[in-house]
Amino acid sequence: MPEKTTDKLPNIHATALVVGETGVLIVGPPGSGKSRLAEEFIQSACLSGRFAALVADDQVFLKKSGKCVVAVAPEPIRGLMEMRGTGIIRKHHLERAVMHIAVSVEYTGKGERFPDPSTQREVLPGLYLPLVFLQPGRLMDPFALLAARLENRLFA
């Protein structure tokens, strides 16, 4: 049986999606709310007329393409999202997409009140994404905060 091209890609525990033209990689431990936050992004995008699509939920292959990080959905879970307490649901999805920003749902309660806007997360050796910390259920439009971060409209 021929080897799939994704067999050699790093597989990380994360959720990847696209909102508008922005690839969002949500990272955090199991049960921390990655899928819930992804669903909040998708719902707020729909309400405001923006495009949104899931790339992968829970498991994401990452690959380097030039200076970009590309998220690739593992074939068995393409278009599927696990909503804790609800089950598996089908979502509009993309097979792969360039990621532009990482969102961490990890919150210890000890975070800086005004985090450094230049904070980044290494997602592949030598490849970094701007990093924002968000908690599920806290924002009406989580993408508005990410857009401000990407457009350098946040004050430090």
Image (tube, grey):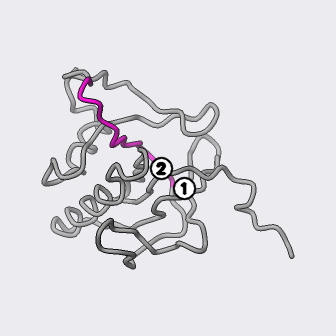
Circle 2 crowding by C-alpha within 10 Å: few under 14, some 14–19, many from 20: many
Whether residue 150 is situated above or below residue 10 in the rendered picture:
above
The residue carrying pointer 1 sits among few (fewer than 14), some (14 to 19) or many (20 or more) residues within 10 Å by Cα, namely: many
Front in this rendered view, residue 60 or 33: 33
Which residue is rendered at x = 39% and y = 76% of the image? 88
Q: CA distance from mark 2 to mark 1?
A: 7 Å
Residue 4 in the image: x percent, y percent? 76, 67
Residue 105 lies within the magenta run = yes
Instruction: Provide residue 151's location: percent of width, then percent of height.
Output: 29, 38
Residue 73, image x and y in percent?
Answer: 55, 65
User: Would you identify the image quadrant in which residue 20 lies?
Assistant: bottom left
Tell me: 61 left or right of 132. Answer: right
Q: In the picture shown, does residue 10 fall above or below 107?
A: below
Q: Is residue 147 above or below residue 116?
A: below
Going by the numbered disc 1, the residue's amino acid type is Ala
In the displayed structure, does residue 61 sit left or right of residue 47? right
Instruction: Give the residue at x 22% y 50%.
Output: 142
- Answer whether residue 62 is magenta in the image: no
Quadrant for the C terminus in the image:
top left
> In the rendered image, which quarter contains the N terminus?
bottom right
Q: How many marks?
A: 2
The residue drawn where x is 22% and y is 69% is: 46
Q: Residue at x 20, y 48 (%)?
A: 144
Q: Secondary structure at mark 2?
A: strand
Circle on res. 99? 2
Residue type marked 2:
Met
What residue did someone put label 1 on? 71
Taking the image as shown, residue 64 lies to the left or right of residue 106, namely: right
Q: Residue furthest right?
A: 1
Residue interval drawn in magenta = 98-110
Mark nearer the N terminus (2 vs 1): 1
